[in-house]
Amino acid sequence: MHIAPATHYRSVHTIPLQADFAVIGGGLAGVCAAISAAREGLKVVLVQDRPVLGGNASSEVRLWILGATSHMGNNNRWAREGGVIDEILVENMARNPEGNPLILDTVLLEYVLKESNITLLLNTAVHDLEKSNDDTIRSIRAFCSQNSTCYEINAPLFCDASGDGIVGFLAGAAFRIGAESRDEFGEKFAPAVASSELLGHSIYFYSKDTGRPVRFTPPAFALDDITQIPRWRDFKAGQDGCRLWWLEWGGSIDTVHDSETIKMELWKVAYGVWNHIKNSGLFPEAETLTLEWVGTIPGKRESRRFEGDLMLIQQDIVEQRTYPDAVSFGGWAIDLHPVEGVYSAQPGCTQWHSKGVYQIPWRTMYSRNIANLMLAGRIISASHVAFASTRVMATCAHSAQAVGMAAAICRRDGLLPRDLVEPKRMQELQQRLLRKGQYIPGVSLHEDKDLARQAQIEASSELALAQLAPSGETMPLDSSWAMMLPLPAGSCPKITFLVDAATDTTLRAELRISEKSDNHTPDVTLASLDLAVAAGKNQALELNFPALLDQNRYAFVCLLKNEQVAVHLSDQRLTGVLALCQAGNKAVAKSNTQSPPPDIGIDTFEFWTPKRRPAGQNLALRCDPPLHSFGTEQLRNGFSRPIRNANAWVADFSDQTPKLQLSWEQKQTISTIELDFDTDFDHPMESVLMGHPERVMPFCVSDITVLYRPAHAAKDADLVPLIQIQDHHHSQRVIALESPIETDCLVFSLRQQPHSPPASLFAIRCFS
């Protein structure tokens, strides 16, 4: 028994912690920054003020994770973010294709807990800090309400990934709230006069069908006049969660200090909407639905944005400007919402896309006046207009991986974040990120210590794409369609499609490319053909375009809309080849062509997008001469996703057990092998609600056996197994050998799951 005598004053139980790197905020940005740094050997303290990780992606809010892929609704092909956030999304897909947010909570927690270098503090809120001088943070103080404990966390480096920027605010870091004027940065989409208007918060709800009638009595605070919401006629029974993202409010008030007021208003709206669905009589199908869950905290969009040495602006996104210190990328639309939110008569958002992804430079990711403070998540240095694109979670998480890696370099060399802008240091940061799966537009991996670069690589087969065989299924050309093919420089090969025609007609075909070679927007027409098609079935339609390609690049072989014609489809799929439809996705675009007003600095262009599996078959075709774009030379070109080429070695369709052999003239000491796989970077892998037809991406090699010739063996000796991997499903596999081997030959024997596309790999790297 313990008896505490009466006293004048008691101090809160306090635990001091010493770290190499303190990360404040356990949303996706904070999680990825912490994991990235911990894997590089830093002792990390991760402070999260909520009971779960994930922020807006968690089961507390339930927003789907998205970034540059934008629901596959823009022209950013193969643009899913890489590295740590890709690991999380791919693993969540394997465990949770149904999109259960509670399962995602467990994935995030598992990924953090298995890093022994991370000390995780949940339910712990930062409330104070100390500085060693005006521009340097010494320590932060945070309180956990669940164990009534205060933590004093000392570190040489801090990352604010808290959303509202609590550490930056307390430290005196320069920040902004609201929208800049059009004149400040020359942003044509910005308002003429600076304003304090912000994007608001949202609260979501889920319903459930019980199979029997359910009554609902609304709470007294529920909105009783649904017509106060101008879009009230848009509500539907069974429309759950973040599909109602436009239940938004609070942009006209203080989104930091008035957050509880905003939450109460959103609860009023949410329960009022449910009352309308249940009790208005307009939705008889809702009779058996019950209200299963309502969010208890709002999902925040915007509050403070902190100033770095560079501020990202509208032109960086639309013009896809390049920077020597690029460490990440974005690709979500410039997505701004009306300040009145759900009570506005305007559309819930205005989304304007760029023609491709854009770079995000390192100088946006640290404070310009607090020397040891890095920035991650939605608070990075961006104007209000640019923030409208960078704010989405997958983009935030991808950039935060760069912050974690930067912290490791800074800690090793006694540097501050700004010091990494120096060219050699920046090159190291970029290369280390690329090796971990990060994608940086325009930057390739060229690791000099990679022994695979010196090897002779042979394959049991290499795909020469001569045809995609017809399946017997056809599709009417009620929209324009294209095959996106990696073509070599020079004359365009003859492409032949198989078509049916209901009547005699003329079909227009076009050969298009992107103005920028790394984009996938077909905005330049090289040649067009008007082809006479007679009524009948199974007709070979030969396209001989009189055009030259200036370099190896993607081209779009287009068949324009003609409802009298049906094109034959193919069930054969392969890495780096897609069929595209000239169609808009209503989730992110109003039509199949982006047509902005002429004076807002946004491009006009068409959307050409693929269909999601299990749909999305290719168009059956023949190619003469065959395309030799899938050879072993792709395995070490420094790119691990399709960009201006497929960038992948692909086995022949007939090769069911392909092998790759790496040979050296002299024996090499190898301790680490790295493989980059195709997990379909075009798939957004939304984490909730959508539902997905697969747990594992069909392009990803599932089983790998690595064999080698031991150092003492003769040149003609049989190879022996080194390692076997089964049921693989991730984008990267790092094989760290227990003991280094000496060998002059490695063989990789690959196996796909039945009925999968041909085996492929983006890269093989070997290190001593």
Image (cartoon, grey):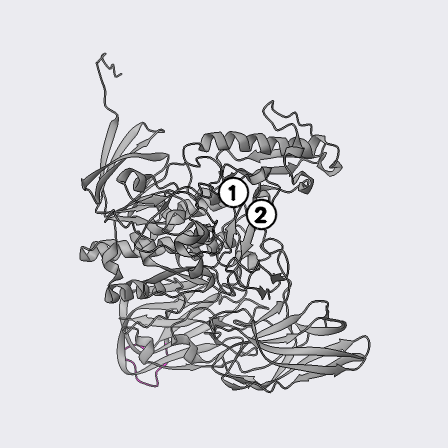
Residue type of the residue flagged with mark 1 = Arg
The magenta span reads: 709-719
Q: Is residue 23 above or below residue 457?
A: above
Q: Which residue is mark 2?
A: 689
Q: Which residue is mark 1?
A: 62
Q: CA distance from mark 1 to mark 2?
A: 9 Å
Residue occupying the point 42% across, 67% down = 676
Visible in this render: residue 613? no
Visible in this render: residue 412? yes
> For mark 2, does the 10 Å Cα neighbourhood hold few (<14), some (14 to 19), or many (20 or more) residues?
some
State left or right for residue 743 relative to residue 277. Answer: left
The kind of secondary structure element at disc 2 is loop
Residue type of the residue flagged with mark 2 = Leu
Q: Earlier in the sequence, mark 1 or mark 2?
A: 1
The x, y position of residue 681, in whole percent, is 49, 63
> For mark 1, does the 10 Å Cα neighbourhood hold few (<14), some (14 to 19), or many (20 or more) residues?
many
State which quarter of the image contains the N terminus. Answer: top left
Figure quadrant of residue 436: bottom left
544 or 199: nearer the viewer: 199
**Main secondary-structure element of the magenta-colored stretch:** loop
Q: Is residue 256 above or below residue 642?
A: above
Label pair 1/2, CB-CB below 8 angstroms = yes
The x, y position of residue 497, in whole percent, is 67, 79
The x, y position of residue 703, in whole percent, is 47, 66
